[in-house]
Image: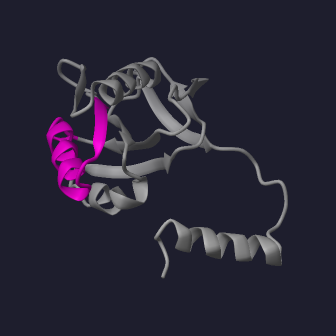
Amino acid sequence: MRTKIVKINKPQDINVILGQSHFIKTVEDLHETALTSVPGIKFGLAFCEASDRRLIRYSGNNEEMIDLAKSNAEAIGAGHSFIIFMKDAFPINILNAIKNVPEVCRIFCATANDVEVIVGETLQGRGILGVIDGASPLGIEGDEDKKWRSAFLRKIGYKL
């Protein structure tokens, strides 16, 4: 087996969800899930079909996000993987709904951080071994950091 690191190519302010699924129906189900979970979401998604025609299937409602999804899915090239790019929405707004799509097997990451995907390749094909999401910690949170975190979550409306 060979390993390869694939950097997700995206603008800094764009969120991405990377996961694994098992059925061609994933594209339509994820599209419906995105639209019904977050009013006004702009998104694109791509799914790497692992059998039969083995095409990269895609959908979405925003050309920029669709193009990001297609090009990154092609770079990763792992069977049954899917990738969703979104703006005007955050993963926290859609993640549980995505996890509840019957054909979704796992989520590797949901983030706006820089992401590197660790891909394993054999004679049969490629699979995602894991991800590097963001950077390593620089220290341990102190009292002032806790106050900042609490205030920030309330400022953006995620805590009362």
Quadrant of the image occupied by residue 100? bottom left
Residue 29 belongs to the span the image colors magenta: yes
Question: For this view, does 99 lie left or right of residue 72?
Answer: left
| Residues in magenta, as a range | 23-47
Q: Nearer the viewer, residue 20 or 96?
A: 96
> Where residue 95 sits in the image (x, y, percent)?
36, 57
Look at the picture and state if 64 lies above or below 42: above
Residue 38 belongs to the span the image colors magenta: yes
Question: For this view, does 23 lie left or right of residue 148?
Answer: left
Q: Residue drawn 46% across and 70% down?
A: 157
Question: For this view, does 135 lie left or right of residue 3?
Answer: right
Q: Residue drawn 41% across and 28% down?
A: 78
Q: Residue drawn 51% across and 23% down?
A: 121
Q: Residue drawn 22% across and 45% down?
A: 30
Count of numbered tags: 0
> Where residue 88 sits in the image (x, y, percent)?
37, 46
